[in-house]
Image (cartoon, helix red, strand yellow):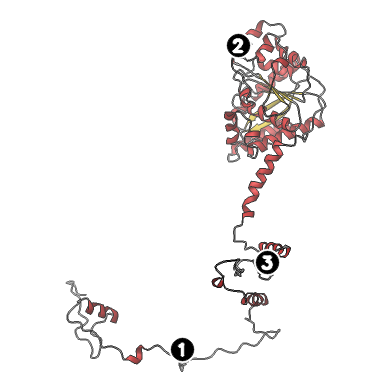
């Protein structure tokens, strides 16, 4: 190429006998047939003998510069060092006489197709099995072939265990046989679920622990002492205006047996509902004699026997919570794994100590349950370590994680134990209930309701 943009014509001053154009012969033929440059002429055709292919089996001429490789001495066993392994040779011999898949007839059972071994799989030591064979021999051979599957080949058995484990957990939690799998305490355990901070999982823990214990052979009573009536909603118990509720027991001294309702679908579980009328009970209890022990008298007068009585407290430290603390023997404190949950815990402990000194000397904090645990945050680990260092063995080993199934269950009027028994939330509450039951069997309480 010149400075002015012109190109040299390679056809000028070309040597004698050279091609008319440096382009390929195919290009020349295409240009000639399509009306290309008029100065380009088709090249002369090659002689006919050059276009003929070599004869089949004909030996190629050996170039004079070829040097044969040196001979390799045989190995100790008499075979060449690069000879194939005996297993591969046996596999080739085994599959040599197998019919081809293209020879399979149109009708009837097709003959077995030998499968070539995967590069990363274990060689198959079993012989080729005819698909038309029947009986125990064919079943055993099929099982043998299934045992030698490549590691890189995904199988259905690799996907089934998570579903199988979830189904096993669901059966274990629901306990359809009705057997007593959780130990029953020697005396009635009255547990008050209290924490003046809202949203820490008091009602959720009360409902799910009660259902878990009832499904495994324990007689459980849930007393809904929260005017919101969330525990009644979670157990699908009617608590609209006009339904006999715990307000009638506290204000009008109605027997608890006339108010308690049996929970549908859950054997051995009863619930005392709460209506909106309970919101004014604290004001009305101010002028009532022995206002702090009204609930305690109602529980003691119940004619039946319960293994557990769970009292769901409101998020406050008013008279309703004081009634629950006086009626209970043990306090179960749900603690959310966040800083705000720890901030008000000291005040709750002080109130429990005041009730123990003046109203109920048998009251004690027996159980601490960590809820809404998020393993992705360091804050949850820090809160867990602080709580365990302060309360020691009172903290349950089971921790309730954040699980959407736990939040969805109340919208269907169920607990997570029956809504999705295979979920992580149901499994965690089941483990917590089992731990509570085992602790009660080792350390029986000294009071009978």
Sequence-wise, the earlier of marks 1 and 2 is: 1
Q: CA distance from mark 3 to mark 1?
A: 45 Å
Helix, strand or loop at disc 1? loop
Of circles 2 and 3, which is in front?
3
**Numbered label attached to residue 280:** 2
Q: Residues within 10 Å of mark 2 (few under 14, many from 20)?
A: few
Query: Mark 3 sits on what residue?
Result: 133
Position of the C terminus, as image quadrant, is top right
Q: Residue at x 58, y 30 (%)?
A: 412
Q: CA distance from mark 2 to mark 3?
A: 81 Å
Q: Residues within 10 Å of mark 3 (few under 14, many from 20)?
A: few
Q: Residue furthest bottom?
A: 64
Q: Residue at x 59, y 35 (%)?
A: 405
Sequence-wise, the earlier of marks 3 and 1 is: 1
Residue 204 rendering spot, x and y as whole percentages? 63, 28
Query: Mark 1 sits on what residue?
Result: 56
Residue 369 rendering spot, x and y as whole percentages? 68, 31
Q: Residue at x 22, y 81 (%)?
A: 10
Residue 422 rendering spot, x and y as whole percentages? 65, 40
| Badge 2 vs badge 3, beta-carbon distance below 8 Å | no
Vertical position of residue 108 compared to residue 393: above or below: below
Front residue of this view, candidates 341 and 179: 179
Helix, strand or loop at disc 3? loop
Front residue of this view, candidates 271 and 71: 271
Helix, strand or loop at disc 2? helix
Residue 117 rendering spot, x and y as whole percentages? 61, 69
Position of the N terminus, as image quadrant, is bottom left
């Amino acid at each position: 190429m010149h400075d002015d943009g012109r190109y040299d014509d390679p056809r000028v001053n070309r040597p004698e006998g050279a091609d008319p154009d440096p382009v390929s012969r195919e290009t020349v033929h295409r240009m000639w047939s399509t009306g290309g440059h008029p100065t380009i002429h088709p090249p002369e055709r090659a002689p006919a003998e050059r276009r003929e292919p070599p004869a089949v089996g004909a030996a190629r001429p050996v170039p004079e510069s070829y040097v044969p490789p040196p001979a390799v001495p045989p190995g100790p066993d008499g075979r060449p060092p690069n000879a194939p392994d005996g297993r591969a040779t046996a596999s080739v011999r085994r599959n040599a006489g197998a019919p081809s898949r293209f020879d399979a007839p149109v009708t009837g059972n097709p003959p077995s197709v030998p499968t070539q071994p995967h590069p990363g799989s274990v060689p198959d030591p079993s012989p080729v099995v005819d698909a038309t064979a029947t009986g125990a021999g064919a079943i055993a051979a099929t099982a043998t072939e299934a045992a030698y599957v490549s590691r890189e080949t995904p199988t259905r058995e690799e996907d089934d265990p998570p579903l199988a484990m979830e189904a096993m957990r669901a059966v274990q939690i629901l306990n359809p046989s009705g057997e007593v799998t959780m130990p029953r305490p020697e005396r009635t355990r009255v547990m008050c679920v209290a924490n003046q901070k809202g949203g820490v999982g008091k009602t959720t823990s009360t409902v799910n622990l009660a259902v878990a214990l009832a499904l495994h052979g324990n007689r459980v009573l849930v007393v809904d002492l929260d005017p919101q009536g969330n525990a009644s909603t979670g157990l699908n118990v009617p608590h609209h205006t006009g339904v006999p509720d715990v307000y009638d027991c506290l204000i009008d001294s109605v027997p608890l047996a006339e108010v308690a309702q049996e929970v549908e679908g859950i054997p051995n579980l009863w619930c005392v509902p709460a209506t909106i009328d309970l919101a004014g009970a604290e004001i009305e209890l101010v002028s009532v004699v022995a206002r702090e022990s009204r609930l305690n008298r109602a529980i003691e007068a119940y004619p039946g026997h319960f293994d557990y009585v769970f009292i769901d407290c409101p998020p406050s430290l008013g008279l309703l919570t004081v009634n629950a603390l006086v009626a209970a023997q043990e306090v179960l404190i749900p603690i959310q794994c966040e800083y705000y949950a720890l901030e008000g815990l000291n005040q709750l402990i002080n109130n429990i100590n005041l009730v123990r000194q003046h109203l109920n000397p048998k009251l004690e904090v027996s159980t601490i349950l960590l809820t809404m645990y998020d393993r992705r945050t360091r804050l949850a680990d820090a809160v867990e370590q602080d709580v365990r260092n302060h309360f020691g063995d009172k903290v349950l080993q089971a921790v309730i994680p954040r699980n959407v199934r736990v939040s969805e269950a109340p919208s269907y009027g169920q607990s997570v134990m029956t809504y999705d028994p295979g979920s992580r939330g149901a499994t965690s509450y089941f483990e917590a209930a089992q731990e509570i039951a085992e602790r009660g069997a080792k350390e029986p309480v000294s009071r009978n309701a």
